[in-house]
Amino acid sequence: MHIRPISPGELDQFVAAGGSPEHREEVRWYLRSMFAAGSMRPEWCFVAEEVGVRPLGRVAFWALPGTGKPFALVLLDIPWDSEYMGMGTCLLEAVHDEARRLGTKEIEHVIDNPPMRPQFQYHQEKRVALLQSVGFSLKRETDRFEWPGGKPPVGADRLSFRTLEEVGEEAFVDTMKRVSEGTFDRQIREERERLGPQEAAREFFEDARRVEHDPSWWRLAYSRQDGDLVGLVMPAAPPGFLTLFYVGVVPEMRGRGYVDDLLAASTATLLDARTKDRDEKALRADTDVTNVPMAAAFERAGWARFAKRREFSVDLE
């Protein structure tokens, strides 16, 4: 079995190396859009092949635009109905070596249920078994929400907002630290424990700013009545869709329904951005399955739960 990156002229071979023929045009469109966004490159697309046989399997790196380091594996596909474990292990171990060479210390892979475009991840339990065989472990499980259309929710007129540019980075990071206190989100909680609250907030902020966004979208919210800090909103535009990257209420203001106001404001921001861009991108957001209050808030705001996502990661060091 030989594992190699494709050349720029071999996109069709990569597309044909996995999945059903009816999905190939969609995968091809996804690759081209990710190349344009800077999240993928032809040399980050790998095929598994035998001499004299067309490519039998594939996988690719995905990165946050501008970072130059693989963040995740996408478009993983091999012959799941045959000896998938041997080929899959060979393929993943080879690309892990390449990720290390590029300076990646940890890489993730997500599995959505039900399977959806553009990855079409059928044979899910076989996928999990393969991931675990090469060192991946479950990092987080989320409920996925999507805006189904219609008018945005209307929040109570009890908040005022100041943008990141108005308050400055340090005030924003400090609010992120306060908002993350007592979080139900497994990943954020573990990062607080590993790095400490301040450093975890700073790292989260630096990761978030790599995702495309308008600086005016990131805002701190204050009570109109007394001027006290309530929370923050961080809409963003990763490649292919729009999202609520982070929404949160500081501990002392919880239980007063402010999350509904923040979600209403964030949803309106994203819908307004979509209208101005004349681009009907989907609005999507994820929340940890243990964060029941946040999931309920999304549903009150009119967002629809459409999938579950399991996030796996492997330490390459």
Image: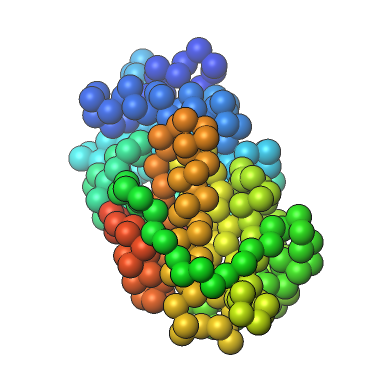
Display coloring: rainbow
Position of the N terminus, as image quadrant, is top left
Query: Which residue is at a point 32% across and 59% down the rendered structure image?
Result: 302
Query: Which residue is at a point 33% across and 19% down the rendered structure image?
Result: 53
Query: Which residue is at a point 31% across and 24% down the rendered structure image?
Result: 24
Q: Residue furthest top?
A: 9
Count the numbered circles shown: 0
- Quadrant of residue 230 within the rendered picture: bottom right
Query: Which residue is at a point 69% across and 58% down the rendered structure image?
Result: 163
Task: Specify whether residue 149 is in view.
Answer: yes
Q: Residue furthest left?
A: 81
Position of the C terminus, as image quadrant, is bottom right
Residue 278 point in image, percent of width and height: 47, 30
Residue 81 point in image, percent of width and height: 20, 40
Depth check: give the residue in front, 197 or 168. 168
- Quadrant of residue 40 within the rendered picture: top right
Residue 297 point in image, percent of width and height: 38, 70
Depth check: give the residue in front, 209 or 216. 216
In this rendering, would 40 be left or right of 129? Answer: right
Is 5 rendered above or below residue 315? above
Depth check: give the residue in front, 297 or 106. 297
Task: Specify whether residue 139 is in view.
Answer: no
Residue 57 point in image, percent of width and height: 36, 32
